[in-house]
Image (spheres, grey):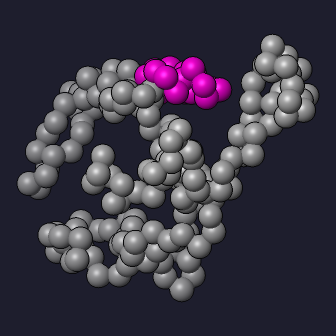
């Protein structure tokens, strides 16, 4: 966890000196909460708990936060990514991230946090908080099922394929068409 805190900026964090714990802004402002009834209508802040069907949290990302320079963000003058479709010849010359050369950056956006939340329920990633988060984030359980189905379908498709050597690399070959 200490390593992750050095790599990723969290949207909010706890004030480490205050008790009881108090949230403070980090990469985002404190959430604006809107309580809603079963029909979706906004309720007043002091609404009776029994009338609240769900809550909307709007979290504004702090502007001006940039990713560390990285080859994945490098773009040319027209705005096209430079390193997303590298040729096999170019890939043979790359042994470390420093060999790529060009780097770029971009601003942190809300979708980056949404992506991180969605990753919690990916079938190939074990997250100890996923079960808890599914109870509180609308649609997260459905996303988990969709991803599980897609993963199962992909596994079924791969099981009908075989690996065959190709110029020192491995490539997928569909056995149904390879034997015909």
Image point 21% across, 44% down: which residue? 171
Horizontal side of residue 145 vs 110, given as left or right: left
> Is residue 131 visible from the viewing direction of this image?
yes
Magenta segment includes 166:
no
Read off the magenta span: 131-149
- Reply above or below: 119 against 43: below
Q: Residue furthest left?
A: 168
Horizontal side of residue 157 vs 106, given as left or right: left
Prevailing secondary structure of the magenta residues: helix
Residue 136 appears at what percent x and percent y?
60, 25
Residue 175: quarter of image: top left
- Reply above or below: 115 against 150: below
Give the position of the C terminus as an image quadrant. top left
Q: Residue furthest top?
A: 50
Horizontal side of residue 30 vs 90, given as left or right: right
Residue toward you, 175 or 75: 75
Residue toward you, 90 or 25: 25
Residue toward you, 110 or 37: 37
Horizontal side of residue 81 vs 92, given as left or right: right
Residue 77 appears at what percent x and percent y?
54, 86
Image point 30% across, 46% down: which residue? 1
Image point 25% across, 29% down: which residue? 161
Image point 11% across, 45% down: which residue? 165
Magenta segment includes 142:
yes
Residue 79: quarter of image: bottom right
Residue 81 appears at what percent x and percent y?
47, 72
The total of numbered circles placed on residues is 0
Residue 134 appears at what percent x and percent y?
54, 23
């Amino acid at each position: 966890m200490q390593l992750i805190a050095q790599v990723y900026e969290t949207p909010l964090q706890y004030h480490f000196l205050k008790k009881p714990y108090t949230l403070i802004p980090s990469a985002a402002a404190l959430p604006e909460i809107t309580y809603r009834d079963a029909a979706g209508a906004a309720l007043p802040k002091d609404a009776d708990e029994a009338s609240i069907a769900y809550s909307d949290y709007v979290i504004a990302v702090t502007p001006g936060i940039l990713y560390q320079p990285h080859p994945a963000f490098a773009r040319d003058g027209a705005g096209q990514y430079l390193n997303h479709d590298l040729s096999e010849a170019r890939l043979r010359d790359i042994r470390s991230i420093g060999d790529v050369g060009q780097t770029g950056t971009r601003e942190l956006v809300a979708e980056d946090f949404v992506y991180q939340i969605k990753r919690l329920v990916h079938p190939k990633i074990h997250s100890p908080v996923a079960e808890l988060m599914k109870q509180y984030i609308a649609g997260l359980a459905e996303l988990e099922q969709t991803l599980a189905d897609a993963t199962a379908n992909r596994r079924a498709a791969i099981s009908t394929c075989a690996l065959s050597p190709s110029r020192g690399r491995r490539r997928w070959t569909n056995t149904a068409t390879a034997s015909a």
